[in-house]
Amino acid sequence: MARPALVLVVLAGWALPARAAEPAIPSELTDYVNAPDKSFAWKLADKTEADAGTVYTLDLVSQTWHDVKWDHKLQVFVPKGAKPQATMVMWNQGGNPSFQSALVGMELAKAVKSPLAFLFGVPKQPLYGGKTEDALIAETFVKYLETKDGTWPLLFPMAKSVVRAMDAVQAFAREEWKFEVKDFVVTGASKRGWTSWLAAATGDRRVKAIAPLVIDTLNIPVQMDNQVKAFGRPSEMVKDYTNRGLIPIPKTDAAARLWQIIDPWTYRDRLTLPKLIVNGANDPYWPLDALNTYWDGLKGEKYLLYVPNAGHNLCERDKDGRAEQLPARTIATVAAFCRSQVFGTPMPKLAHEYADRADEICLRVGYEGTAKGQRLWTAEADSRDFRKARWTEQALTGAEAKREVGFRPPTKGYRASFVETEFEADGQRFNLSTPLRILEAPKK
């Protein structure tokens, strides 16, 4: 049944009530990141030349946080023939340089066709009795609840390490290349994707664009409810937080404030910069349709890639369970997005609209750009838990600039679908996705 139109009549002499003021954006993040820190330092430690290009290694101290000095390796990959550009890609991750990171770094730099920086050691770990990764973040969240000290959440020094790495790269480029790097595309995966969001949320204008990978959890209180609805309980992947009583979120003012100040959703009015979101369609951390609760609320230029048959590492698995060595689909799309930011060329535009019909859902898809094909990806599951589902593809005839695709519910269980468009730019192919929909079999 069509919804009746809402008619608003304003009589002469009447005034509309004033809109409620938007809540102020919390200051704890910017207070910490912008605080002066005399321990910041960097130096060029190594320069290695090879057939593929040159790798510079910098030693960086980003800050001292609660008496702990955060030291990092910062590598700059320069492919053969590439020249410095005003915009540089900054990838942040944990650990230290390795053969695998060198392979990914140089491959991504070659695909972007410009120098690229890799920041390691985000966060500084292990700390506090050997804690690492989520266990360490959870420890700092508990310390915040105990002290109400806004410097404790580990995501804040993680964001500051990216900001200080930008400082170091700019200084390095001036000394080594006599060149001014002006801004950055910040990217990283999982909690380093979270860091990418928060580095932009500081309002630092040098963050030109972001590409957060596999951190499908904006609007955190809603997402925690989504997990229980999809999985029957919070994902086992967030057990470090459930074990510390942080999830489900305690009904206290301090807990509400904690999850607010570290949630990128809180800063969405500040996050109007171009953004590429990449999710694995079988990621065990997040419900499959998590993005649907925040996508429409994101402002500015935005792009999406779902990687079918891929978990948290974004490496796709074939029907026999064999995983690729490198996340090829992700690298291609992230590189295309970064190239567009580095060289100022437009990304293809992909628009979508879902419409409910009597017995199906219609997806209208339109695009601008050079498309090479479109595919419908579909998976089925007994419940809303699609973590182990197998995605299959169906080629859509041609590459029409506008098309409609009908989704019918399954006869039993649940079916999820989305449309992927393959584009070509600068002689390289990459993919963009529509948001997905999950359909339930009709109740009998």
Image (cartoon, rainbow, N blue to C red):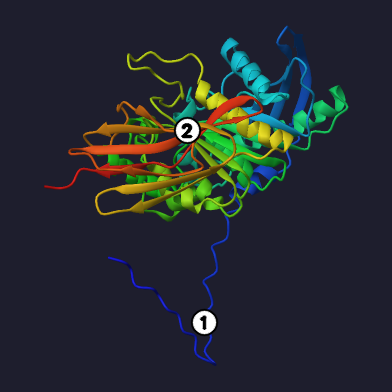
Residue 229 pos. (x, y %): 28, 44
User: What residue occupies the far right of the structure in this picture?
Assistant: 178
Classify residue 390 by image quadrant: top left
User: The disc labelled 2 sits on which kind of residue?
Assistant: Val
Q: Earlier in the sequence, mark 2 or mark 1?
A: 1
Residue 161, by quadrant, is top right
Q: Residue tagged by mark 1? A: 16
The residue under label 2 is 214
Label 2: element kind: loop
* Circle 2 crowding by C-alpha within 10 Å: few under 14, some 14–19, many from 20: many
Q: Residue at x 34, y 28 (%)?
A: 391
Q: Which mark is residue 67?
A: none
Residue 247 visible at all: no
Q: Would you place residue 209 above or below residue 126 in this image? A: below
Q: Amino acid at mark 1?
A: Leu
Q: With 11 as the anchor, is 5 left or right in this view?
A: left
Percent coordinates x, y for residue 339 in the rendering: 67, 31
Q: Are marks 2 and 1 in contact (CB under 8 Å)?
A: no
Can you name the residue that lies furthest to the top here?
51
Identity of the residue drawn at 33% across and 47% down: 225
Task: Report whether 103 appears left or right of 42.
Answer: left
